[in-house]
Image: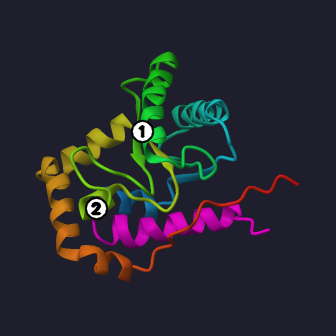
Amino acid sequence: MNITTDETIIAATKLWLERAVIGLNLCPFAKNVHVKNQIRYVVSNATTHEDLLRDLMRELEVLAETPAVKIDTTLLIHPYVLTDFFEYNDFLDITDAALEDMDLEGALQVASFHPQYQFDGTQPDDIENYTNRSPYPMMHLLREASMVQAVSAFPEAEKIFDKNIETLRCLGHAGWNDLGLVQPTPPLKNNA
């Protein structure tokens, strides 16, 4: 049986972060926290929505209670659940409710990344969807204060989304494939 380890999943995620997110400058704020080792990578072994919600709430708590100089942001990677994008997208309402229930709304937020990410009004293989395509389903837990600080220091931050779409349209599918990113099949969980 082929078993994907947490280390393999994190390595694929870091490669994506370095080559796509930072390398293509899709998020101009990512390089700083990456270089300072302020990104927490967590692989959830959840196989149900309920287990994932527990992991999400635990990680929100960890992020809220840890100084930003130690952990500024968390990537909660969940390769065994919500592998279907539309099911994943529906789950994001639950993440918003969790933030509210934990009194973290306005302090933390959750951004979404998925191997099948699809913006409303696009076709599944439209290149602009790749701005949010990650090797595995994941939730990016962010501090609102860090985002406000980063955006205020970045000229024309409101144009990042449009610039990213243009970057990917110029890159095209062939250029994306040339990045050499891991395109994993859903990992098999070791239940032994």
Name the residue at 54% across, 33% down. Answer: 60
Task: Give the position of the C terminus as an image quadrant.
Answer: bottom right
Name the residue at 27% across, 66% down. Answer: 25
Which residue is the site of mark 2? 26
Q: Residue 134's quadrant in the figure?
A: bottom left
Per the rendered image, the range of residues in magenta is 1-27
Above or below 54: residue 170:
below
Frontmost residue, 40 versus 169: 169
Measured from the top left, where is residue 187 in percent x and y? 65, 61
Frontmost residue, 37 versus 192: 192
Which residue is the site of mark 1? 89
Frontmost residue, 44 versus 128: 128
Tell whether 125 sits left or right of 93: left
Q: Which amino acid does label 2 sit on?
A: Leu
Please name the colour scheme applied to the rendered image.
Answer: rainbow
Q: Which residue lies furthest to the right in this view?
A: 192
Name the residue at 67% across, 65% down. Answer: 7
